Image (cartoon, rainbow, N blue to C red):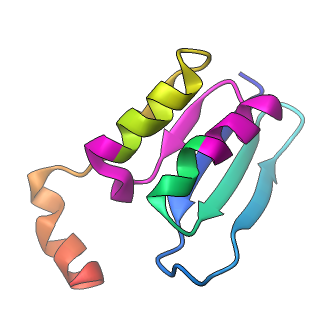
Amino acid sequence: MKKWGFIYTLGDPSAEPRSDTIGSTACVLLCRGVRSIDDAPGVARELVAEGAELIELCGAFAGGGLAAVVAALDGSVPVGAVFYGGEAGTGLHRLFG
């Protein structure tokens, strides 16, 4: 795999979307920050057009956001998401209230 995409939420609907690229010639990570989970399907299609071979979503997307991106890409690349186990609840509550 040479390129993969990661989409995360900015936590502020008025924030400007972000686009960052990290990596080397062996593997490139295309990071995209979106204002809303609703923006993710379009951004995922853009990432695939840029050559991403796999898409991962931050934990804020939950099942519905993941399903929307999977449907938008129609099997063109694998899509996964970060999820936290129950043991992470205390730390997540501390971070996000």
| Residue at x 71%, y 21% (from the top left corner) | 1
Question: Which residue is depicted at the point 24% across and 52% down?
Answer: 84
Camera-side residue: 19 or 70? 70
Within the image, what quadrant is residue 95 found in? bottom left
In reply to whether residue 47 is colored magenta, the answer given is yes
What secondary structure is the magenta-colored segment mainly?
A: helix
Q: Is residue 81 left or right of residue 88?
A: right
- State which quarter of the image contains the C terminus: bottom left
Q: Is residue 83 left or right of residue 7?
A: left
Q: Is residue 91 above or below residue 5?
A: below
Position of 54 with respect to 71 (left or right) is: right
**Residue 46 vertical position relative to residue 78 in the rendered view, above or below:** below
Count all numbered tags in the image, as a single digit. 0
* Residue 90 part of the magenta-drawn span: no
Question: Magenta residues, as a range?
Answer: 42-64
Horizontal and vertical percent for residue 94?
A: 21, 83
On the picture, is 51 further left or further right than 9? Answer: right
For residue 62, say whether it is visible. Answer: yes
Q: Position of residue 12 (x, y in %)?
A: 51, 81
Image location (x, y in percent) of residue 73: 57, 25
Residue ID at (44%, 53%): 58
Would you say residue 81 is visible in this rendering?
no
Where is residue 77? Give x, y as percent: 60, 20
Report the residue that reaches farthest toward the right. Answer: 25
Q: Which quadrant would residue 81 be assigned to in this image?
A: top left
Nearer to me, 3 or 15: 15
Which residue shows up at 39% across the image and 39% down it?
66
